C-alpha cells in the first residue's frame, strides 16, 4: 500500500497512522501525540497533503475581503494580545458608526465579497451600536457577506445586554450577521487560558456559543492559538473538542491554526514560532479534523512564503486580501497590511495549485468585466 502511494518514513510510529489515513479511518489522541512528537515532518506533510488532495485536488481557495475593527478598547487585557487597550489610554480608539461605514466604503469595489468584523470587549458601547453597525453595513453593501464577532464578543454582548446567547445571536443574525469568524478560541485548556486570557469566556463557553450559533443557522470558523505556553497535550485536547462539536453540528467551515506573535504583549519574552512548527500545525490540523472541509493558511499570520508551503502540507485556503490588518501588526507582524487579488493568485499558482476565488461560504465566485456571480 505504501509503495502504491509512495509514502515513506523511517519513523515507525507513523506507519499505523499512515494505514489509518490511507483507509480514511479516524485518528486518535495517541496518534495526534505521535504526529506532534515525530521528527519526520515531511512524512506528516505527505499524509496531510494526501487528505487535502483527496478532498480538494489542487483547488486552493481565497477571497476578496476587508477587515474592520470597530474598537480596540477591551476590558479583557489578555496577555496574548497587543491589540486591546483600556479606555482613555493613548492609542485607544472607537469608531463612530459613520466612520466604520466610511472605512468599509474606502477602496470598496464590486470585488469585495466579505467584511470580517471583530474588535475589543468595550465596556460602554451598547448592544444597539453593534446591531446598527451591522444593519448599516447591510443596507450600504447588501451583497457583502458579514462575518462578524467572535464567540467571545457574542458572549460579552449577551452579558451586557442581559440576553441569552441564543437571543443575542438571533438579534445579530436579524441585523445582518451572516456567519462568525473563528477567533477567541485560543487553547481550551483552563490551565493555559488562566495565563494567556484569564478574563475571557472559558473553553466550554466558547464551544457552547459556537454550538448555539450553528443551531440557529450561523456557520462559523474555528481557530487554535499555538506557540506560547501550551503543551502538545493541550493542542490535542483542543483539536478533539473541535472535532467532537463538529460531529454534532457540522457548522464549522474552516480550521485556522494561528501562530502566536509575542511582540508588544506581556508574553514578549517568549520566542516566535518556527517555520517547521507552523507547517506541522497545519498538517496535524488537516489529519485530526477529518470532519472539517477546509484548513486555512492565514497568510497574514504565517507570512505569504510559509502560507505557500502550507498549501502542500494540508491547507486548501489562503484567506483573503484583508486590506488593513491590526491584530497581528500590533503584535509585530511584518507582513503587508493587505494583498491584491492578483498577488494571492500568483502565490497560489506558484505553489503549483489552482486558485479559486470563493465567497465566505466557499461558493466559487466568477467575475466578468462588469459583473460578479456567486455560484449557488
Ligand atoms: O482571536 C490575538 C489571535 C485572533 C494575537 O475566521 C493573536 O476566517 C497571535 O481569529 N499573536 C484573531 N494571535 C484572528 C482570527 C482570524 C483571522 C483570520 C481569519 C479568521 C476567520 C479569523 O488572533 C484572536 C486571537 O486568537 N491573536 N493576539 C497575537 N499576539
Image (tube, helix red, strand yellow):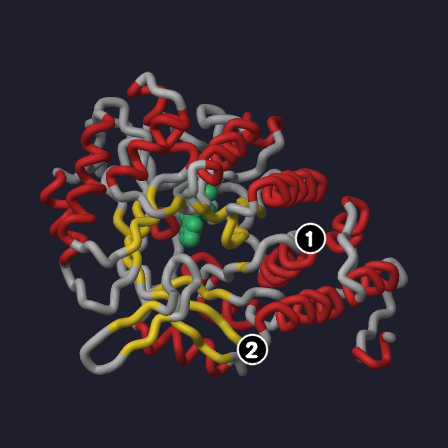
Q: Is residue 36 left or right of residue 360?
A: right
Task: Say which element carries label 1.
Answer: helix
Q: Is residue 322 left or right of residue 192?
A: left
Q: Is residue 261 left or right of residue 38?
A: left
Which quadrant would the N terminus be assigned to in this image?
Answer: bottom right
Given residues 238 and 141, the one toward you in this image is 141
Is the residue indicated by label 2 positioned so its CB lies within 8 Å of ligand 1? Answer: no
Which quadrant would the C terminus be assigned to in this image?
Answer: bottom left
Given residues 245 and 351, the one toward you in this image is 245
- Determine whether 291 is above or below 265 in the image: below
| Residue 286 found in image quarter | bottom right
Query: Residue at label 1?
Result: 288
Instruction: Report the disc number at residue 305.
Output: none
| Residue 46 found in image quarter | bottom right
The residue that appears at 33% across and 78% down in the rendered structure is 342
Task: Say which element carries label 2.
Answer: loop
Q: Is residue 265 visible?
A: yes
Question: Which of the marked residues, 1 or 2, is nearer the chain's N terminus?
Answer: 2
Q: Position of residue 52 (x, y in %)?
A: 62, 68
Q: How many marks?
A: 2
Q: Is residue 370 left or right of residue 58?
A: left
Given residues 137 and 239, the one toward you in this image is 137
Q: Position of residue 85 (x, y in %)?
A: 29, 33
The residue that appears at 15% across and 49% down in the rendered structure is 139
User: Callout 2 environment at 10 Å: few (<14), some (14 to 19), or many (20+)?
Assistant: many
Query: Residue at label 2?
Result: 58
| Residue at mark 1 to residue at mark 2: CA–CA distance | 20 Å
Q: Position of residue 109 (x, y in %)?
A: 18, 67
User: Callout 1 environment at 10 Å: few (<14), some (14 to 19), or many (20+)?
Assistant: many
The residue that appears at 48% across and 82% down in the rendered structure is 350
Q: Position of residue 323 (x, y in %)?
A: 27, 61
Amino acid at each position: 500500500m505504501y509503495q502504491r502511494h509512495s509514502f515513506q518514513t523511517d519513523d515507525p510510529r507513523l506507519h499505523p497512522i499512515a494505514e489509518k489515513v490511507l483507509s480514511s479511518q479516524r485518528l486518535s489522541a495517541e496518534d495526534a501525540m505521535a504526529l506532534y512528537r515525530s521528527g519526520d515532518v515531511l512524512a506528516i506533510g505527505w499524509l496531510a497533503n494526501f487528505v487535502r488532495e483527496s478532498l480538494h485536488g489542487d483547488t486552493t481557495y481565497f477571497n476578496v475581503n476587508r477587515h474592520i475593527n470597530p474598537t480596540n478598547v477591551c476590558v479583557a487585557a489578555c496577555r496574548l494580545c497587543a491589540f486591546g487597550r483600556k479606555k482613555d489610554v493613548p492609542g485607544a480608539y472607537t469608531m463612530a458608526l459613520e466612520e466604520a461605514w466610511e472605512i468599509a466604503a474606502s477602496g470598496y469595489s464590486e470585488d469585495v465579497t466579505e467584511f470580517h468584523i471583530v474588535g475589543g470587549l468595550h465596556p460602554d458601547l451598547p448592544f444597539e451600536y453593534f446591531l446598527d453597525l451591522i444593519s448599516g453595513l447591510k443596507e450600504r453593501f447588501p451583497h457583502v457577506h458579514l462575518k462578524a464577532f467572535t464567540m467571545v464578543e457574542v458572549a460579552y454582548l449577551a452579558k451586557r445586554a442581559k440576553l441569552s446567547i441564543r437571543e443575542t445571536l438571533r438579534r445579530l443574525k436579524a441585523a445582518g450577521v451572516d456567519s462568525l469568524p473563528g477567533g477567541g478560541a485560543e487553547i481550551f485548556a483552563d490551565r493555559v487560558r488562566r495565563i494567556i486570557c484569564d478574563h475571557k469566556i472559558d473553553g466550554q463557553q466558547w464551544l457552547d456559543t459556537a454550538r448555539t450559533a450553528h443551531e440557529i443557522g450561523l456557520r462559523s470558523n474555528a481557530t487554535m492559538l499555538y506557540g506560547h505556553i501550551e503543551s502538545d497535550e493541550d493542542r490535542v485536547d483542543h483539536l478533539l473538542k473541535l472535532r467532537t462539536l463538529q460531529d454534532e453540528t457540522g457548522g464549522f467551515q474552516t480550521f485556522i491554526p494561528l501562530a502566536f506573535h509575542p511582540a508588544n504583549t506581556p508574553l514578549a519574552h517568549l520566542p516566535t514560532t518556527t517555520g517547521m512548527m507552523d507547517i506541522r500545525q497545519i498538517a496535524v490540523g488537516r489529519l485530526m479534523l477529518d470532519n472539517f472541509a477546509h484548513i486555512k493558511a492565514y497568510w497574514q499570520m504565517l507570512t505569504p512564503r510559509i502560507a505557500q508551503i502550507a498549501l502542500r502540507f494540508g491547507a486548501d485556503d489562503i484567506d483573503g486580501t484583508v486590506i488593513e490588518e491590526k491584530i497581528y501588526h500590533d503584535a509585530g507582524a511584518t507582513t503587508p497590511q493587505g494583498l491584491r487579488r492578483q498577488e494571492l493568485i500568483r502565490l497560489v499558482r506558484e505553489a503549483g495549485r489552482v486558485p479559486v476565488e470563493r465567497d465566505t461560504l466557499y461558493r466559487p465566485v466568477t467575475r466578468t468585466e462588469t459583473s460578479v456571480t456567486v455560484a449557488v
